[in-house]
Amino acid sequence: MNNNNKQLLVELGEIKKVFFTDDVETHALNKINLKINQGEYLSISGPSGCGKSTLLSLLGLLDTATDGRYHLAGHDVSHLNRDERAKIRNKEIGFVFQAFNLISDLTVAENVELPLTYRDDLSKQQRQSMVRESLEKVDMIHRADHYPSQLSGGQQQRVAVARAIAGKPSIILADEPTGNLDSKNAQIVMALLDQLHQEGATICMVTHDPRSAARAERMIEVFDGKIVADQLAPSTSAIAV
């Protein structure tokens, strides 16, 4: 995809993250510089402990950097307090986690609607319409009244994707989205992410799977808290499902 005319969505500048435990300093991220344009699909890969999950947490405003600057969708989010971060996160960011993170005593529709209930700019009718639209997109509208325990792992992850996209976020962050799935359901979820990207979604995915990483249009490798590679994926790496 040519992003020359795309709007800059994410900009990280000289990002550092240090964890302090007792008398030990752990430098999880060291001078990370990263730009993501609207509509891009990128993967972040690297060995365990390299900092890729920490990077995703900072991108998702789940944590804050020790130093550096972060601009998201026109907002300087570098120094926001917890409540301010939560407000922007709920509107601008959709999450897909490895463990699905669905609430067992809520129906599929209620799980998808839950993040929307924290937004005061949406009416109940608007929320319900957004839930229906997102469930239809992942082909799970027929399961709207079921509970997570009544779904397969692949179906639960599709519901999680619906929850991530329901609020029409600026960016979708996926953390090992196929990590708990068998190969067949992993292919279905990856094909769904491909489809969302083709429809214009901006996606940033952490994955240890080279096949999944190669489906993105841009591949980033992290090692020892630094970005050591940032390249376009080969056009032949798109895998038809």
Image (cartoon, rainbow, N blue to C red):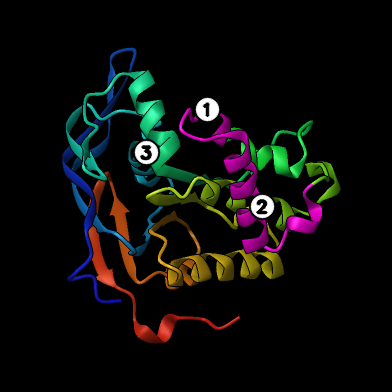
Residue 114 occupies quadrant:
top right
Tell me the quarter of the image containing the C terminus.
bottom right
State if disc 1 and disc 2 touch (CB < 8 Å).
Answer: no
User: Image point 86% across, 47% down: which residue?
Assistant: 150
Q: Secondary structure at mark 2?
A: helix
**Callout 1: few (<14), some (14-19), or many (20+) C-alpha neighbours within 10 Å?**
few
User: Looking at this view, is 18 or 168 the one in front?
Assistant: 168
Q: What is the three-letter code of the residue carrying label 1?
A: Tyr
Q: Gap in Å between the C-alphas at discs 1 and 3?
A: 25 Å
Give the number of the disc on residue 118: 1
User: Looking at this view, is 84 or 58 the one in front?
Assistant: 84
- Label 2 vs 1, first from the N-terminus: 1
User: Image point 52% across, 27% down: which residue?
Assistant: 118
- Using the rendered image of the protein, determine whether residue 160 is visible from the camera's viewpoint: no
Q: What is the three-letter code of the residue carrying label 3?
A: Thr
Q: Is residue 84 above or below residue 47?
A: above
Name, please, the residue furthest toward the bottom: 236
Counting from the top left corner in percent of width and height, residue 131 is at 63, 47
Read off the magenta span: 116-144
Q: Which residue is mark 2?
A: 132
- Asked whether, in this view, residue 138 is left or right of residue 143, the answer is left
